[in-house]
Image (spheres, helix red, strand yellow):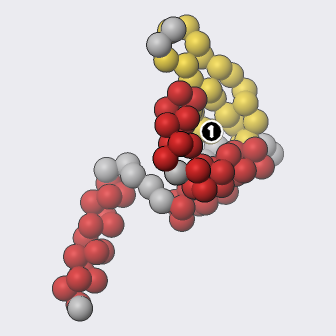
Amino acid sequence: MATQIAGAARALVGIEKSGLWGRKEMEEWLGRDADYVVLEPRTLEQYRERHPDHMARFDALLREHFELIDRVDEYPWQVFEIYARRR
């Protein structure tokens, strides 16, 4: 059992270093840590299809704590939305 726990802990560190995140990290970042958020809406749609519950919470946190301040759409194949934390 101890080996499994140690393995899981090491795997979590690797996952975090890879830039992957879970509900806990999302709550921390969007709930209090991040001052800005840069999103690619087209990519988010793919996540919404695969993880609707997770993304519903993501959208709620974004609405609650951030406001859209700019949209970069100079490139037809890629659009970015930039949000700033509400003060």
Residue shown at the point (69%, 36%) measured from the top left: 84
Q: Residue at x 55, y 35 (%)?
A: 45
Whether residue 42 is visible to the viewer of this picture, yes or no, is yes
- For residue 33, say whether it is visible: no
Q: Which residue in the rendered view is the most extreme toward the right?
A: 87
Which quarter of the figure is the C terminus placed in? top right
Q: Is residue 58 above or below residue 9?
A: above
Give the number of callouts. Answer: 1
Task: Choose between 33 and 8: the one closer to the eye.
Answer: 8
Q: Residues within 10 Å of mark 1 (few under 14, many from 20)?
A: some
| Residue 44, above or below 42 | below
Q: Position of residue 29 (x, y in %)?
A: 58, 54
In the image: residue 24, left or right of residue 81? left
Q: Is residue 19 left or right of residue 4?
A: right
Which residue lies at the image location 31% right of the left edge and 64% below the top edge?
13
Q: Position of residue 11 (x, y in %)?
A: 27, 67
Question: Where residue 8 sits in the image (x, y, percent)?
Answer: 28, 75
Compared with 79, 9 (above or below) is below
* Residue that badge 1 annotates: 36
At 49% from the left and 32% from the top, the residue drawn is 43
Quadrant assignment, res 53: bottom right
**Three-letter amino acid code at disc 1?**
Tyr
Outermost residue toward the left in this view: 3
**Image quarter (top left, top right, bottom left or bottom right) of the N terminus:** bottom left
Residue 68, x across and y down, in percent: 73, 30
In the rendered view, would you say 72 is above or below 67?
above
